[in-house]
Image (tube, rainbow, N blue to C red):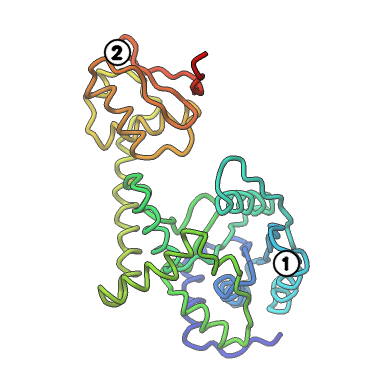
Amino acid sequence: MARRALGPATLAVVQAVEAAHEGEPVLVACSGGADSLALAVAVTVLASRTGCAARAVVVDHGLQPGSAEHSERVAEQVRELGLPAEVATVTVTAGGQGPEAAARDARYDALAAAFGAGERCYLGHTLDDQAETVLLGLARGSGLRSIAGMPAVRDRFVRPLLGLRRSVTRQACREQGVSWWDDPHNDDDRFARVRVRQSVLPVLEAELGPGVAEALARTADLARYDADALDALTPTGAPPDCTVLAGLAPAVRHRVLREWLLAQGAHEVNQRHVLAVAALVTDWHGQRWVEVPGLRVLRRAGVLVVEPHRPAVADR
């Protein structure tokens, strides 16, 4: 497929990709949506300009009828854009979490397994995705990290498009004559993210004026800076000694407790759980224990200890 001249939207996507690139070979995660296809177009431009190796992978979650055929069509579309592409098929297992989280975990596992030597994987998340993530984190009330959104770089995963609106990636596809696929799950209001996208953000923009999504994305950046600074101040491997914990600033103490709980095998720990455990340290009055997902936390002789969660047994 011959590439067209770069229109303004395509140029914006290319510039974002070039700004993120550090000379490494690139693996593009492509779903067939406008964001990832615009990203694929930009990476072909990057490869032609820099000579870097680039390819793509399409993850087939197997969650919809005909997903294998669809994934192969997307891979072929990416090949026509100029990138080698392959399909990675995964099995999504809920494992006690929601379907969105299970699919995400399976997808990242597949992408990690696809890495070649020195590659980084470019993901098509946009500023709109970031704003939605911040609102979902705010609703959970799980602390500063929950509103820090998605980082531009984490390990070998890169999100070059976090500064661009979804409308830009769609316009880039139009400029290049690239048709995209809209995942029906993105219109299924059973999912919280879809409700945020279709109802919450539009209402905020209508009532508060334009620029809400951009403000939420800036909030994520600021929250991440603060969270990173607090994490750097948080002692690692700190013992659960209540005297030591009581002497820490609350923000640091809560981080120590959260990391300790996760290390002990707790899961889906939120701020409510952390505050309840913190009360064993700072508001001790002989309470028995605190239940967190997967664990029971007790205070004994001035030290926090854990026991496996024990389901209640009915009286005989």
> Taking the image as drawn, is residue 39 in sight?
yes
- Crowd around label 2: few <14 · some 14–19 · many ≥20 (10 Å): some
With 71 as the anchor, is 219 left or right in this view? left
- 62 up-or-down from 155: above or below: below
Q: Amino acid at mark 2?
A: Gly
Q: Image quarter for residue 306?
A: top left
- Residue labelled with disc 1: 71
Which residue sits furthest top? 301
Q: Position of residue 90 (x, y in %)?
A: 71, 52
- The percent coordinates of residue 156 (x first, y second) are 55, 52
* Mark seen at residue 283: none
Q: Residue at horizontal 62%, vertical 62%?
A: 25
Of residues 76 and 183, the one nearer the viewer is 183
- Element under disc 2: loop
Answer above or below: position of 161 versus 236: below
Which of disc 1 and disc 2 is earlier in sequence?
A: 1
Alpha-carbon neighbours of circle 1 within 10 Å: few (<14), some, or many (≥20)?
many
Amino acid at circle 1: Ser
Q: Secondary structure at mark 1?
A: helix
Residue 105 locus on image (x, y percent): 59, 49
Residue, x 32% and y 74% (percent of image)? 205
Name the outermost residue toward the front: 316
The residue shown at (46%, 32%) is 293
Q: Which residue is identified by label 2?
A: 302
